[in-house]
Image (tube, rainbow, N blue to C red):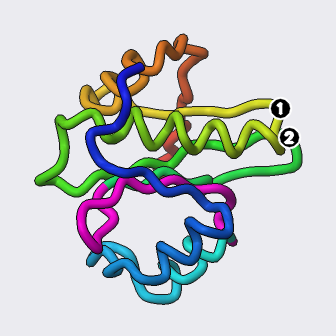
Amino acid sequence: MRPSPLPVIVSDTAGRAAARRLVRPGNWPPGEWHELIEGRFGQWAMAVHGDEAVSICHSPAANASAAEAGIWTREDFRGRRLAPAVVAAWSERERRRRDVLFYSTSAANHASQAVARALGLAPLGWIWKVVTTT
């Protein structure tokens, strides 16, 4: 995989210190942002442009043996191969603690599927939801 076109910080001691100095993205409420950068949502990786995080991968769901990648890239930075870079950096950190890592996407999210392809991920299965009506 090609290197990231922007610097990537991770949730180690230096990365957490650097993240505290970043401008909080508008889509992250202040409390959640603090929890994220302090590692309460598991490991994370961020592509940084100036004093802003423009692409973030973190662990929104995890247990003792598995973690799922959650990815966000600011709209004006999409298509620059940042998402594969931060997912790869996240997985390097998270795989030290977890046996299984997941990258979930939907059938309609073609950009997210492109990230999975760029990382060489193999499809595992489908999640089906049962909707009941009353």
Image-quadrant location for residue 94: top right
Q: Residues within 10 Å of mark 1 (few under 14, many from 20)?
A: few
Please state the extent of the stretch shown in magenta in the rendering.
40-54
> Of callouts 2 and 1, which one flags the residue occurring earlier in the amino acid sequence?
2
Left or right, 2 with respect to 44, comes to left
Which residue is drawn at the image coordinates 68% and 60% (left, top)? 42
Which residue is drawn at the image coordinates 49% and 73% (left, top)? 18
Q: Main secondary structure of the magenta part?
A: strand
Type of the residue with mark 1: Asp
User: In the rendered image, which residue does mark 1 sit on?
Assistant: 99
Badge 2 marks a residue whose secondary structure is loop
Whole-percent x, y for residue 72 in the image: 36, 53
User: In the rendered image, which residue does mark 2 sit on?
Assistant: 65
Q: Are marks 2 and 1 in contact (CB under 8 Å)?
A: yes
Type of the residue with mark 2: Ser
Badge 1 marks a residue whose secondary structure is loop
Image-quadrant location for residue 25: bottom left
